Image (cartoon, grey):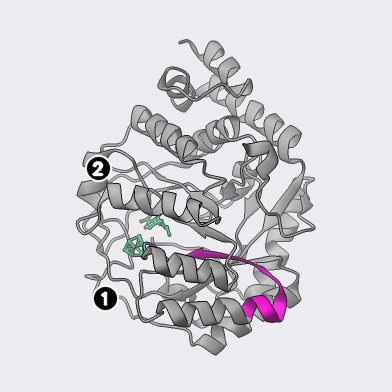
Amino acid sequence: MDFIEALRAGVEHRRPTVEWLVPLLEAEGEQECLLLHAADRVRAQMVGEAVHLRGLIEFSNYCRRNCLYCGLRRHNDSLERYRLTREEIVETAIRAWRIGYKTVVLQSGEDFYFSTDLMADIICEIKSRTGLAITLSLGERDKSAYSAWRKAGADRYLLRIETTEEKIFREIHPDDDLYERKRGLFVLKGLGYQLGSGVMVGLPGQDALSLAKDVIWMHELGAEMVGIGPFIPHPQTPLRNEKGGTLEQALRLVAVLRLVFPYAHIPATTAMGVLDPLGREKALQAGANVMMPNITPTRVRPLYELYPNKICLDENADRCFDCATSRIISLNRTIGADCGHVIRQAAS
Ligand code: 5AD
Ligand code: SF4
Ligand code: FES
């Protein structure tokens, strides 16, 4: 299929197929421009001008896994590890609520110190004291944990599939299994979570065809939030010498996702802001409608080092809120006034 036919299929929100996804994911120059503009228009029509802010609390950098790309991997001995206390996590959420956030995202490595019960307790406390929407991003746990947290008041769960290409998945996840990760996502869906997934762009061995298959799989899953970011090689990991992804690749994927998932929540991610100071603004103009400013206490921010050169390390929650707000306003967009739940009736 040529580019123009592919773009037409996209703006008509046809069922995703590799035939039309690949030419869009490979677009360059003028075609790339057309793609990003088309996605921006679809975003405006379908989800409007509001950008939803989610306050991100990175509460533990302990992780039991050894993903080859990630600075938090268990075998990274040069990283100082931290855990916020239950009280610090709750206080951080309350502070976010006072600043004006409507959602907090609780994120950590796969840290079983935070047991099913301890997490449920934290979720319950935040919910009862603030009424905030609560998103979890805690990696893979068992069904009983997901279920207990849902009952405790968690609304959403983010679990990236990272890649659906079996060979790549196996290579970069020595202690994980693609089938298990997929199954976990369907379990979360069945429990009534608003479900987020996503991938990294620019992984070794990945090409437009494999990204197209990722998009198709996430569509079958019925993802309602899709977070993507460029892979950024971390010097203390086995993938230190790989090339990594580019902002352009990430922006094209954001645009394609907006065409395939017209009503989804798509964040302008921090990793895009690492590759380009205006990376997040560019994503917001290529289909994205969510931003996730950091609200983690400043003293531990540098330790949550998934990848190098993370932004906002010296800032605090107030500063990031103000910064994110002014970036959004500079684009003539508005700040989401409610908690920005997923749009279900339209998505189904
Ligand atoms: N570059 C970019 N993104 C990364 N993540 C982890 N390590 C890296 C890296 N080196 C992303 C993964 C994970 C999310 C929390 O952070 O996609 O799901
Ligand atoms: Fe742990 Fe997640 Fe990093 Fe993998 S990507 S090492 S599971 S924090
Ligand atoms: Fe943190 Fe800009 S979002 S300083």
Which mark is first along the chain, 1 or 2? Answer: 1
Q: Is residue 242 left or right of residue 193?
A: left
- How far apart, in angstroms, are the residues tagged by discs 2 and 1? 26 Å
- Secondary structure category for the residue under label 2: helix
Question: Residue 220 in the image: x percent, y percent?
Answer: 46, 35
The answer to whether residue 241 is seen in the rendering is no
Q: Looking at the image, which residue is at 54% across and 38% down? A: 254
- Secondary structure category for the residue under label 1: loop
Dot 1 beta carbon under 8 Å from ligand 2: no
Residue 171 against residue 326 in the figure, above or below: above
Q: Which residue is mark 2?
A: 168
Question: Residue 314 in the image: x percent, y percent?
Answer: 55, 74
Dot 2 beta carbon under 8 Å from ligand 1: no
Between residues 50 and 76, which one lies in front from this camera angle?
A: 50
Given the image, on which type of amino acid does mark 1 rest?
Ser
What label sits on residue 78 in the rendered view? 1
Q: Is residue 324 left or right of residue 278?
A: right
The answer to whether residue 170 is seen in the rendering is yes
Magenta range is 126-139
